[in-house]
Amino acid sequence: MRTQRASRLISELRVVLDWDGTVTEVDGLHIFIKEFGDREIYAQTEGALGRGMSLHDVIRIEMGTLTLPLEDAVAWVREHVTVRRGFREFAEEYRPVILSSGFTELIEPVLEREGVSLEVHANRLDVRADGWHAIWRDDAQCAECGQACKRGGLPVGAPVVYVGDGVSDHCAALAADRVFARDRLVTYLERKGLPFEPFEDFVQLAASLRESHSAKNGSTIA
């Protein structure tokens, strides 16, 4: 049971989660595009990411190869996209924000399946028979990285814990107070010599946050 002290400490920070490959066990958006889009175009654009093509360029081209109805897409993600261990309990305790370069229409059905309601900041879909179009959450260029990124979507007014795994998380991770990372985000932060903590699942993440709060305040959080 959460104590009053635990509730206060949790309210003093904001946890921000990437979605694909972070909340989910695998990058569901990539699998979805390979399943229903053009695999050759997918391979070409992924190979060009950061080598003349921005993340928005890559997403725009890849999503344009999708033509299935949205209801079929929703049914697929509900059946196939799985979340990491402990996500529901973590979401109930910490009320994290989802900050994703993916799409709200493909995220919220999975949250609903898990019985979780969270604040989601992601792109939107314009589903067309001749190819899906992305409606960007924010397409303004970041003053730090020069691209449309997630940094501007971070909460203000409280310490930010950021949890991510990939290219879309680079700039936001640099602006966070504490970072938990896996996969390509680990490689990026190691190359820059910046601190981070490993992320495996939400049981481990919750334990790490409780431990640090307990050490800081000299007491055990139940």
Image (cartoon, rainbow, N blue to C red):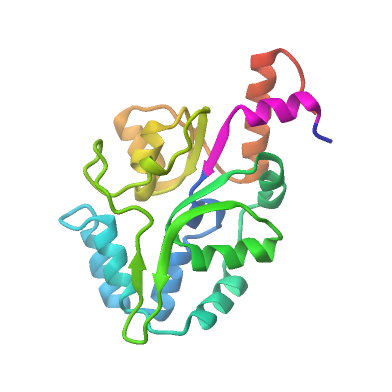
Q: Position of residue 31 (x, y in %)?
A: 45, 69
Q: Which of the 4 image quarters holds residue 39?
A: bottom left
Magenta run includes residue 142: no
Query: Relative to 134, does residue 218 appear above or below in the rendering?
Result: above
Q: Residue furthest left?
A: 52
What stretch of residues is rendered in magenta?
3-16
129 on left or right of 163 = left
115 on left or right of 122 = right
| Residue 222 or residue 134, whichever sits in front | 134
Residue 187 visible in the displayed image? no
Magenta run includes residue 6: yes
Query: Relative to 18, does residue 187 appear above or below in the rendering?
Result: above
| Residue 63 or residue 37, whichever sits in front | 63
Q: Residue furthest right?
A: 1
| Residue 50 or residue 75, whichever sits in front | 75
| Residue 109 or residue 21, whichever sits in front | 109
158 on left or right of 118 = left
- Quadrant occupied by the C terminus: top right
Q: Residue at x 41, y 40 (%)?
A: 186
Q: Residue at x 52, y 42 (%)?
A: 16
Q: Position of residue 108 (x, y in %)?
A: 57, 63
- Quadrant occupied by the N terminus: top right
Q: Residue at x 53, y 63 (%)?
A: 107
Q: Position of residue 55 (x, y in %)?
A: 28, 56
Q: Residue at x 21, y 43 (%)?
A: 146
